[in-house]
Image (tube, rainbow, N blue to C red):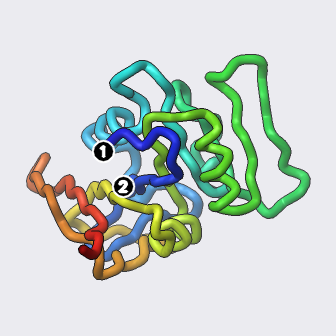
């Protein structure tokens, strides 16, 4: 979906059978190659070589530990001690914003092909309640894990448009927000 010059965005999330997304600041199932490959293919690769934007909460950024290369990284934080971090090249820079709306506005300045919200729990809730969220890419693990963070229920106006089993334990799903006529 080409969303240049708009603030429309998508969500990328992986969760377990009970919508669990995290445990003690980490990923409950560890690194899963199929999940990671899908995440990279969605968020990094563009059709025209432009960079996508990823928006995440501070705790999600801290769990990753570094900016995601090949993407414009925006971190939501309420802490004034967090400032934009630029280590000298765009591959390792992050931009900080204090709200999702500020992050979306900032993201649109870069004219990205896509804007993705990638976590965590509070940011996902804000994103799902924002009418500019048009698509949700889900990696669903069909097992349960020990978790302390959850993905909210999808609002009723999201409809499943694609579902594929990658392995017997892993399903990729895509939901879009149905627009009224």
Q: What residue is disc 2 on?
A: 29
**Side of 51 where 79 appears, left or right:** right
Specify the quadrant that holds the C terminus.
bottom left
Q: Nearer the viewer, residue 105 or 162?
A: 105
Q: In the rendering, at what x and y percent does residue 34 appear?
A: 25, 40
Q: Height in image: 115 above or below 92?
A: below
**Side of 165 where 160 appears, left or right:** right
Tag nearer the camera, 1 or 2: 1
Q: Residue at x 10, y 52 (%)?
A: 165
Q: Height in image: 23 above or below 87?
A: below
Q: Residue at x 42, y 38 (%)?
A: 43
Assign a secondary structure to mark 1: helix
**Side of 73 where 50 appears, left or right:** left
Q: State yes or no: discs 1 and 2 in contact (Cβ < 8 Å).
A: yes
Quadrant of the image occupied by residue 155: bottom left
Q: What residue is disc 1 on?
A: 35
Quadrant of the image occupied by residue 59: bottom right
Q: Which residue is drawn at 55% across and 71% down?
A: 126
């Amino acid at each position: 979906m080409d969303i240049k010059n708009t603030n429309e965005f998508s969500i990328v999330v992986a969760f377990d059978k009970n919508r669990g997304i995290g445990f003690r600041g980490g990923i409950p199932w560890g690194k899963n190659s199929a999940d990671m490959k899908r995440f990279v293919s969605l968020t990094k690769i563009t059709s025209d070589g432009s960079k996508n934007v990823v928006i995440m909460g501070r705790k999600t950024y801290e769990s990753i530990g570094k900016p995601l290369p090949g993407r414009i990284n925006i971190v939501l934080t309420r802490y004034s001690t967090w400032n934009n971090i630029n280590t000298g090249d765009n591959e390792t820079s992050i931009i900080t914003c204090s709200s999702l709306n500020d992050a979306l506005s900032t993201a649109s300045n870069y004219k990205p092909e896509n804007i993705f919200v990638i976590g965590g729990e509070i940011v996902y809730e804000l994103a799902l309640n924002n009418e500019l969220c048009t698509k949700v890419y889900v990696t669903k693990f069909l097992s349960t894990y020990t978790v302390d963070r959850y993905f909210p229920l999808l609002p009723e106006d999201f409809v499943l448009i694609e579902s594929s089993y990658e392995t017997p334990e892993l399903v990729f799903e895509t939901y879009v927000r149905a627009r009224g006529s």
